[in-house]
Image: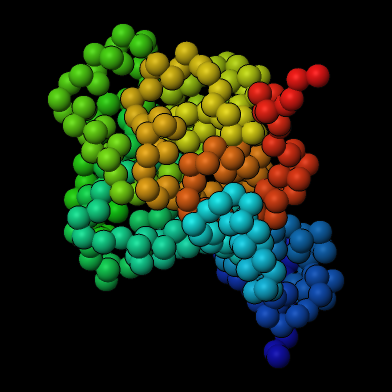
């Protein structure tokens, strides 16, 4: 291999940084050179090489994937399927980069939909970054005459690509089907306003279509201060903290539950324009896609609701969910206990 010319730490600027990152990444990951050797040859400190390698991973120049052995992945998937009475489990390899991890999970979800969807099916679609990434992974070859309908309202503050109406539109374009939008906010100011809105024919028709869907594709939201419903302006930080204080660990379509799968009562439910958990239970196949780190508690709570049929997640969360299930076993129903 030819020697690379020495490079002083101050000899590059943002215009040359990209080529430098490719250069260092190639030397480290392809040629197998140590960080010390790379630093010596380029005239950079070892600490600087470490930072640049990290930057290369963050920018997607380096795509690092951690593959479990096929048998290990199959065992984890089988155990999840058995414990939570699921129809199927798909596990994507763990990835240190969050955008790449979301894409890997979306690819699994897209592959499932391409095999599962049939003409005349109705698919209810939720909000979120994982759900919103799925259309990007669908090849334009599989045409299905089905209908994608928003399962909840949106928000003017939500990112365009995570809005359920936009996700429906993107899925319809990729599959050659139709999209039915729900032109209403996810949450309104009062129960009275919600009751008035759902009586409107345009909104009522969409909700009825979603309730009767053959399949639902949803994400699992968290309860942190930066969760999707806070970022979209549906909830304030104060409200999500109150929900969290009430022991909520996650949500599906804005419906919150605790780690044991119990619904967390909230006055916000009377303000939701969308499907509730009882509606989801009536849908034959509910698909959940999750990729974010630290989501294992939310996933466990969702699985324990008994609503999820197809679980699509990353390897790290999959292993953590099994561990959490043992750490926090389901509580016994007091009504089942015999009286002394």
- Left or right, 251 with respect to 22, comes to left
Q: Residue at x 20, y 55 (%)?
A: 120
Residue 113 x, y percent position in the rendering: 37, 60
Colour style of the rendered protein structure: rainbow
Residue 4 x, y percent position in the rendering: 70, 81
Residue 91 lies, with reference to residue 213, above or below; the image says below
Q: Quadrant of the C terminus?
A: top right
Furthest-left residue in this view: 201
Q: Residue at x 65, y 44 (%)?
A: 296
Q: Quadrant of residue 165?
A: top left
Residue 133 x, y percent position in the rendering: 42, 53
Q: Residue at x 47, y 36 (%)?
A: 252
**Which of 137 and 175 lies nearest the eye of the viewer?**
175
Residue 227 visible, this orientation: no
Q: Quadrant of residue 161?
A: top left
- Left or right, 106 with respect to 25, comes to left
**Which of 256 and 36 lies nearest the eye of the viewer?**
256
**Which of 336 and 287 lies nearest the eye of the viewer?**
336
Residue 170 x, y percent position in the rendering: 29, 52
Numbered label tally: 0
Q: Residue at x 71, y 31 (%)?
A: 332
Residue 268 lies, with reference to residue 312, above or below; the image says above
Residue 318 visible, this orientation: yes
């Amino acid at each position: 291999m030819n020697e690379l010319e020495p490079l002083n730490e101050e000899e590059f600027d943002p215009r040359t940084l990209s080529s430098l990152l490719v250069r260092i990444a190639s030397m480290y990951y392809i040629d197998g050179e140590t960080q010390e050797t790379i630093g010596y040859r380029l005239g950079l400190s070892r600490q600087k090489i470490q930072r640049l390698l990290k930057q290369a991973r963050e920018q997607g120049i380096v795509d690092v994937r951690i593959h479990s052995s096929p048998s290990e992945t199959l065992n984890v998937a089988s155990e999840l399927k058995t414990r939570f009475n699921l129809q199927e489990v798909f596990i994507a390899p763990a990835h240190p980069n969050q955008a790449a991890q979301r894409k890997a999970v979306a690819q699994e979800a897209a592959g499932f939909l391409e095999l599962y969807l049939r003409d005349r099916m109705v698919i209810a679609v939720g909000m979120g970054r994982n759900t919103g990434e799925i259309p990007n992974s669908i090849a334009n070859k599989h045409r299905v005459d089905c209908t994608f309908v928003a399962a909840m309202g949106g928000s003017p503050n939500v990112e365009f690509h995570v809005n359920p109406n936009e996700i429906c539109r993107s899925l319809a374009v990729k599959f050659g089907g139709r999209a039915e939008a729900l032109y209403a906010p996810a949450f309104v100011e009062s129960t009275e306003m919600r009751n008035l809105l759902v009586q409107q024919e345009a909104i009522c028709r969409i909700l009825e279509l979603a309730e009767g869907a053959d399949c639902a594709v949803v994400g699992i939201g968290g309860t942190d201060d930066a969760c999707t419903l806070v970022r979209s302006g549906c909830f304030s930080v104060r409200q999500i903290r109150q929900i969290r204080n009430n022991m909520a660990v996650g949500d599906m379509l804005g419906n919150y539950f605790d780690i044991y799968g119990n619904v967390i009562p909230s006055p916000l439910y009377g303000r939701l324009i969308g499907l509730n958990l009882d509606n989801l239970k009536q849908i034959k196949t509910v698909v959940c896609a999750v990729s974010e780190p630290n989501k294992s508690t939310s996933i466990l709570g969702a699985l324990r609701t008994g609503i999820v049929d197809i679980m699509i997640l990353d390897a790290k969360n999959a292993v953590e969910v099994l561990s959490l299930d043992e750490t926090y076993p389901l509580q016994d129903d007091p009504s089942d206990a015999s009286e002394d």
